[in-house]
Image: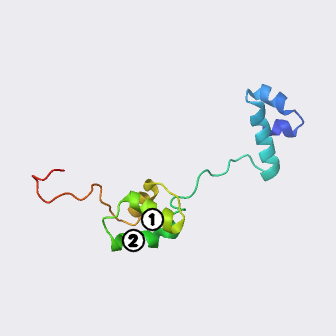
Amino acid sequence: MVGAIERGLSTRQVAAQFAIGIATAGTWARLKRATGAVRPAKQGQPKGAVLDAHANFILSVLAEAPDTTLDEMVERLRDERAVTVVRTAVWKLLDRHGQTYKKRPPMPASKRAQM
């Protein structure tokens, strides 16, 4: 498709010939001119890229207060480090470091006590 544009066909002609959108033909031709290839760039960020710089902070908070919840950690990151993340990102960082977290709030020791 890009070769046809390079040989002189218009993007409209190539789009009709290959049954693709005109904008798609133009985008691929521009990508070829700019980079020399039509391979798309890798999508997304590397795993953990946002929180890796804050791993020591997160682990030290958990060492001081092991019952810190994921939501509390998200709030502390936002307030103290100006980092906005979702709790899943914190959980994934902890999982990579072999850490666990409390899934339930503290419960009374007695089985008769109201939950």
Residue drawn at 11 percent across, 57 percent down: 110
Which type of secondary structure does the marked residue at label 1 adopt? Answer: helix
Q: Does 56 sit above or below residue 37?
A: below
Q: Left or right of 42: which side holds 85?
A: left
Depth order, front residue of 23/4: 23
Which of the two labelled residues, at mark 2 and mark 1, occupies the earlier sequence position? Answer: 2
Residues at marks 2 and 1, CA–CA distance in whole angstroms:
9 Å
Mark 2 residue type:
Val
Q: Residue 105: which quarter of the image?
A: bottom left
Nearer to us: label 2 or label 1: 1
Query: Which mark, by number, is residue 76?
Result: 1
Percent across and percent down for residue 99 are 35, 65
- Marks counted in the figure total 2
Dot 2 corresponds to which residue?
A: 61
Query: Decide: marks 2, 1 in contact (CB < 8 A)?
Result: yes
Q: From the image, which quarter does the N terminus lie in?
A: top right
Percent across and percent down for residue 59 are 40, 70
